[in-house]
Image (cartoon, rainbow, N blue to C red):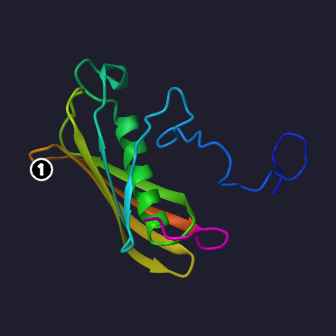
Amino acid sequence: MDNGISGEPAPAQSYARPNRCFACGKENAIGLKLEFSHRPDGEALAHWTPGEQHEGWPGVVHGGLLSTVLDEAMAHAVLASGLRALTAELRVRFREPAAPGRELTVKGWVVQRSKRLVEAEASIAGQDGSEYAHGWGRFLCVGEPAEPAG
């Protein structure tokens, strides 16, 4: 695969490298630093408290960040099921505005797999169980299966 800059192949992804992922990377100074727990059935769970710096409109968490969190939850669910995949398609429905400063529960789960395509869903909910956003994604498997996360 061409890296798009020098015409040379892009380096292979290495999981030994520092994790600079915007959503879950510990080494990303401006990242969200989400911490997901994984279940072997293909489910991922995290808690996130967005701050005022995550606002779009005053008092409302930016929808693009909520979309990012949903995508990450689905990607971690795919990883939890022992697969490596990239997002091919993402659809989000915003149900209610999410306010900064309140803890949110983020959950992703695998719905179906066929050959190289994995379908997943994710939800962002408040502590009372009300859903703020829901996501649906399709992921394209790449490379060798991952070690199931635990």
Amino acid type shown at disc 1: Gly
User: Residue drawn 57% across and 66% down?
Assistant: 84
How far across and how far down the image is residue 111, in percent?
A: 35, 73
**Could you say whether the residue bearing mark 1 is in a helix, strand or loop?**
loop
Residue 91 is drawn in which quadrant? bottom left
What span is in magenta?
A: 141-150
User: Residue drawn 29% across and 21% down?
Assistant: 57
* Residue 89, above or below 111: above
Q: Classify residue 129 as left or right of residue 143.
A: left
Q: Nearer the viewer, residue 47 or 54?
A: 47
How far across and how far down the image is residue 72, in percent?
A: 44, 50
Most distant residue in the right direction = 7
Q: Which residue is mark 1?
A: 129
User: Residue drawn 24% across and 27% down?
Assistant: 100
Q: Nearer the viewer, residue 57 or 26?
A: 26
Q: Classify residue 76 as left or right of residue 95.
A: right
Q: Nearer the viewer, residue 48 or 120?
A: 48
How far across and how far down the image is residue 139, in percent?
A: 51, 64
How far across and how far down the image is residue 5, in percent?
A: 85, 39
Which secondary structure type mostly characterizes the magenta part of the structure? loop
